[in-house]
Amino acid sequence: MHVGRVLFIVGLLAGCQDKTAPSGSPTTSASTSTSTSTWTSTSSSSSNSTSTSTSASASTPAPTSTASAGRPAKIVAQHILVAWKGAKGAPKSVTRSKADAKKRAEEVFAKARGGEDFTALVAPYSDDPGSVDRQGSVGKFAPGDMAPAFSEAAFALKVDEVSAPVETAFGFHVIRRTQ
């Protein structure tokens, strides 16, 4: 009976080691984002893996993946951050109230949805100097790389779609998914 248990464990380990990530997918949680802005989350994401079915999988929980069916492991986006006085990381030059920040973010959203060039809106509206220098780009990121509300909204977008204002501790973000 002891030998049977050892063979079972060896079989499970062999099955786990044969797993490979799809071509082009990262297998570690290292962030490749070039963004160093203060609005990103410092938490790391779990590693990406694909699961295979084995006869033992019914008794062993399958590993979780950050990329669900049809959802990419990483995306690329631009954002416009409209901060309010006292928001986390807000520049000292920002004096607007939270209500005024929301109104301004809604104005940006309306212009972007109305067909104005998102990149052209970054410089006059964004309070994130780091992303202004990059035309609003936050680079490539995984869900756990950003503040949860930001990630949730960005990953829900289709390519070239723009989000309504998303509130985080850093302010209101208007996000455009680019890849």
Image: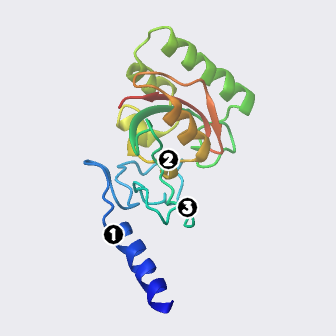
In the image, is 25 to the left or to the right of 120? left
**What residue would you read off at disc 2?**
143
Q: Residues within 10 Å of mark 3 (few under 14, many from 20)?
A: few
**Apparent side of residue 59 relative to residue 50 in the rendered image (left or right):** right
In the image shown, does 84 or 67 lie closer to the viewer? 67
* Relative height, residue 119 to residue 149 (above, below): above
Identity of the residue drawn at 48% across and 43% down: 68
Q: CA distance from mark 3 to mark 1?
A: 18 Å
Disc 2 element: helix
- Report the residue at 51% width, 60% height from top: 62
Mark toward the start of the polypeptide (2 vs 3): 3
Q: CA distance from mark 2 to mark 3?
A: 28 Å
- Image point (61%, 27%), residue name: 165
Residue 110: give x, y in percent of width and height: 57, 13
User: Residue 86 sits in which quadrant?
Assistant: top right
Is residue 111 visible to the viewer in this orientation of the structure?
A: yes
Q: Which mark is residue 17?
A: 1
